[in-house]
Amino acid sequence: MASSTIHPTVASSWLRSPNFDLTFIGLPLILALLSGIAVVTHPHLFYFILMVDLWILGYHHVISTYTRLCFDKKSYQQHKFLILYLPFIVFAATIALAFSFGIWLIFTIYLYWQWFHYTRQSWGISQVYRRKSNGTVSESLWVTQAAFYLLPFWGIVYRSWQAPEKFLGTKIWVIPTPEFLVYLTGIAAIGSILIWGYQRIRAFAQGQGSVPHTLYMLSHWCIFGTGYLLIEDITFGWLVINIWHNAQYIFFVWLFNTNRFKNGIDDKARFLSMISQPKMWWAYLVVCLAITTILYTGLNSSKEIFLALGIPSMIVIYQTINFHHYIVDALIWKARKKPMQKTMGLS
């Protein structure tokens, strides 16, 4: 007979606390969905919402990465190559592709790479929740992986089948995709989610399962389903996922820094540890937003300089920043790495 008593570790599987985690999971989801509703029902609001997203969330989420890379001497020494050399390598590759093939190729790469990046970030967070569950997540990892990845894969297959001529106002090329593949991936995605859902419900009935992990998985499917499948316009759908991704990332980096300095001010990282104290969250935001404003205002005012140097578009600069960010994130946020596990308190 199944036990009706919830496993004692279920209640302790939050990343920080119920209030924080519900905000972390819920607020980006709500912001993204409301933005999607706004641009679908009132398309003229797109550029306004996009600008707010970029200045408050998008640029900020890129800059917040550097609190992990170079806000203290130890981190700077550890990540010197990523800070000083990798940006120029990525820039050289990006501008070479732009000159050789055109801006359309840069946007095509961005379409597929951002899909992969957003999916992988979401998977990483889901793995943090899984490891935080202290064994109460009982379904096999391959079932979770199938359920998690197949819906985003269905989404990008659907977008490829749609074959839109433009993305973010720029011509792109998509991978030729037959219609039967859209149906096949859709059936596989829905089937895997149903299997996962059955196993999770059974786990809860047995006093197992993780409420935070379950809520996060549901938010993941909701966002990717909305952004890639429910919203017809590829750019409007991208905006939904972009807002969710940016807001989520800002929360997570702050959480990481707060956990890292949970014992108080560290003399070896005095500034970062000071603004990373829970009561100093406002200072952390002000610092990141100030750096964001200075850097991106400087970039926007340097358009003529870049044109004089023969750089065809600011798109190259911004996509260099994006591509560099994707590579860095893939290297520094792996849940299986010991330092990450120690900081986040993962089993």
Image: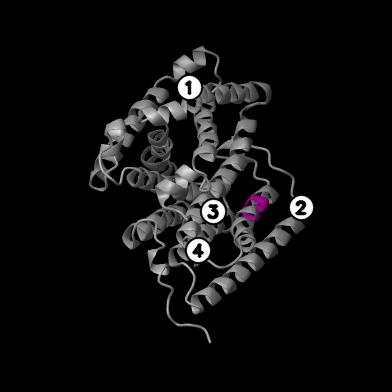
Q: Nearer the viewer, mark 4 or mark 2?
A: 4
Q: Which mark is residue 109?
A: none
Q: Nearer the viewer, mark 1 or mark 4?
A: 1
Magenta highlight on residue 156: yes
Q: Quadrant of residue 294?
A: top left
Q: Residue 16, image x and y in percent? A: 35, 56
Q: Nearer the viewer, mark 1 or mark 2?
A: 1
Numbered marks: total: 4
Q: CA distance from mark 2 to mark 3?
A: 21 Å
Q: Residue 132, image x and y in percent? A: 45, 58
Residues rendered magenta in the picture: 154-158
Magenta highlight on residue 121: no
Which numbered disc flags the more N-terminal residue, 4 or 3? 4
What residue type is disc 4 on?
A: Leu
Q: Which mark is residue 84?
A: 1
Q: Which residue is mark 2?
A: 178
Q: Residue 274, image x and y in percent? A: 25, 38
Which numbered disc flags the more N-terminal residue, 1 or 3? 1
As rendered, which of 111 and 38 lies closer to the eye?
Answer: 111
Q: Which residue is mark 3?
A: 227
Q: Is residue 279 left or right of residue 187?
A: left
Which numbered disc flags the more N-terminal residue, 1 or 4? 1
Q: Is residue 289 left or right of residue 228?
A: left
Q: Residue furthest top?
A: 308
What residue type is disc 2 on?
A: Pro
Q: Residue at 30% of width from left, 35% of height from top? A: 272
What residue type is disc 1 on?
A: Leu
Q: CA distance from mark 4 to mark 2?
A: 29 Å
CB atoms at circles 1 and 2 under 8 Å apart?
Answer: no
Q: Which mark is residue 218?
A: 4
Q: Secondary structure at mark 3?
A: helix
